[in-house]
Image (cartoon, rainbow, N blue to C red):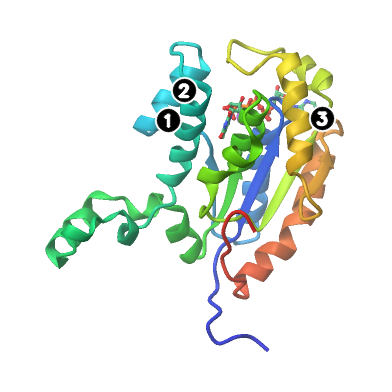
Amino acid sequence: LRASSSESRGALIVLEGLDRSGKTSQSSRLLSYLEGLGHSTELWRFPDRGTSVGQMISAYLSNKSHLDDRTIHLLFSANRWEKRVTVEVSLHKNFESQKFQASVQKKINMKSLMETQLKNGTTLVVDRYSYSGVAFSSAKGLDIEWCKAPEVGLLAPDIVLYLDIPPEKAAERGGYGDERYEQLEFQKKVAKCYQALCDSSWKVIDACQPIEDIEKQLQDAVLDHVMACERGRPLSYLWP
Ligand code: T5A
Ligand code: NA
């Protein structure tokens, strides 16, 4: 029996893992697979370096600017909120007039918002999400509960796919570049912080396998979730 309120929607699929674990390679393969099955699907990634907040993050990651640990943590979170927020909650109560709402709606590209896309039936394959935010900042020594707080109320993923790789193996892949976190000792701390976040709902995949084997396992892991969302699984919110 289906609840009458249940509405078909897209699934929110998140890929997580250390730098070089293969997230970007696997995200695009998963996108092709789901599109091939006829599911409307989009590839998203965080940080989204295309927004003004994203440009500040990008400058920080490439060591062109320096920011306090808490400040950059909140910017990463804001970068997710700007893709989540809906017009209703973004409006100040003094500006409730229909005319004003309509003018704001015109300025906001609703299609760029996460909830709009999911409700339109589009599945989102997201390369990094809140778990990266918490793992990388708590690896610096920030309190994990403090790190989780600004993520409260963001949409919870339907499935987290964790690409599990020993930090030493990841470092061998093409070598780290100049980005701030691409250092073995730091990545070891991040791996420990991911372990603290991981629960039984995550699908952990050995990321040292050949690319095609991982691809197949990810396909098997997501399909049930995509179907459940099409049948009307309700949206849920962090932290469940
Ligand atoms: N961050 C991010 C925060 O601190 N807080 C946050 O809230 C968020 C969202 C962003 C940085 O910001 C941090 C985390 C990051 O340090 P990014 O732009 O997402 O960084 O970049 P990375 O995730 O570091 O991207 P990488 O390109 O390094 O890693 P990927 O995407 O995991 O790996 P991919 O697919 O590019 O593959 C890397 C290499 O390995 C090969 C690929 O061909 C490629 O050369 N490869 C394999 N080789 C052998 N076997 C396999 N199975 C392979 N899979 C891939
Ligand atoms: Na990447």
Amino acid at pointer 2: Ser
Q: Determine if residue 48 is in view.
A: no
Q: Tell me the quadrant of the picture where the N terminus can be found.
A: bottom right
Above or below, comparing residue 25 to residue 115 in the picture: above
* Residue 110 x/y as whole percent: 34, 55
Q: Secondary structure at mark 1?
A: helix
Residues at discs 1 and 2 in contact (Cβ within 8 Å): yes
Q: Determine if residue 91 is in view.
A: yes
Q: Which mark is residue 197?
A: none
- The residue beneath circle 3 is 165
Whether disc 2's CB lies below 8 Å from ligand 1 is answered no
As measured in the structure, the alpha-carbon distance from the residue carrying label 3 to the one carrying label 2 is 25 Å
Ligand 2 resides in the quarter of the picture at top right
Q: Secondary structure at mark 3?
A: loop
- The residue beneath circle 2 is 58
Q: Which mark is residue 54?
A: 1
Give the residue at x 49% y 39%.
77
Give the residue at x 48% y 43%.
80
> Which comes before the other along the chain, label 1 or label 3?
1
